[in-house]
Image (cartoon, rainbow, N blue to C red):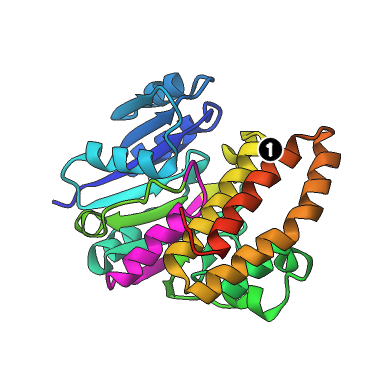
Amino acid sequence: MNRTAAIVITYNSGEVVGRCIRSCLAQNIDVVVVDNASTDDSVDQAKAAGASLVIVNLENFGFGHSANQGYRAVGDVNCILLLNPDVEIASSIDPLIAACVEHGAACGMLQDVKGKPQTGFQLRRFPTSTVLVFEVLSFNRLLSNNWINRNYRYLGENPVIVEQPAGAFLMVRGDVWQAVGGFDEGYYPVWFEDVDFCKRLYNHGVRIRYVSSSTARHVGGHSVGKMPYSNRVTAWYGSLLRYSCKHLSDVERRSVAMAVLLSAGPRCVAGIIGQRNFVPVTVWWGVCSKALLTLFGRCA
């Protein structure tokens, strides 16, 4: 008999994690919660909702580390469902499980709280250097209909195979997870760890199936939105540069590093205005230091 377990990683997720866990239990799947030093009632809410196991970390080890913790804790399972705490399963995941068993990995459809598909967020191709440059320079935000962005986010498409679905609703077969070595814990605390994981799945020969009939409602940005400005900036750019070093050519990663350096000045000024202090100067100095290391071939 196939057994599926969900891994839910919490960080101050008390107001949403209960609904997430109950939606899993309604699908007859066990839930392992890994809490990263929440200061709210996330742990109590997870236990009250019926999680099979709640692992309490005394510090925030980041998503990748916690996902690997969860994998070690679920034991002998056929499929592992990665689920964000602000996701609530809304339909049967039997088709998702079937696709995962057959192909090694699968994802369902994420919808917003009103039931609208989260197009542009959930399904993406692997980021090229051009995509990352466009992201860093905000071209994809300011000119979202450009061809680079449309291709990257599958806009106007209905794919069957997806290169890089969001890790918020992703299912992986247990033997496949083990074969690729789980998540790279160097992406800390978040961002690009799921992209890297999907890239290594792809390199291993796994093609992720998109099962739109299995749906889940997703609030979005629940834990990330609570991160301080300095942590958000440092984590996003640090993870972007790490991914560039691991998966892009020398020329490509240098172009990404140059884009980070070019954008640093205006973003620092915007940060000073938005934060009403000079903390962004220190933050962006750190980002530029990492970009310079990447530019000159000394990747962390």
In this rendering, is residue 221 above or below 136? above
Horizontal and vertical percent position of residue 100: 29, 62
Farthest bottom residue? 147
Residue drawn 34% across the image and 49% down it: 81
Nearer to me, 292 or 14: 292
Horizontal side of residue 275 vs 30, given as left or right: right
Residue 212 shows up from this direction: no
Q: Amino acid at mark 1?
A: Tyr
Residue drawn 82% across the image and 32% down it: 277
Which of the 4 image quadrants contains residue 47? top left
Horizontal side of residue 267 vs 166, given as left or right: right
Nearer to me, 235 or 91: 235
Residue drawn 17% across the image and 52% down it: 2
Horizontal and vertical percent position of residue 57: 38, 26
Q: Which residue is mark 1?
A: 229
Which of the 4 image quadrants contains residue 147? bottom right
Horizontal and vertical percent position of residue 235: 56, 45
Residue 198 is one of the magenta-drawn residues:
yes
The segment highlighted magenta reads 188-216
Horizontal side of residue 5 vs 227, given as left or right: left
Residue 73 is one of the magenta-drawn residues:
no
Nearer to me, 255 or 197: 255
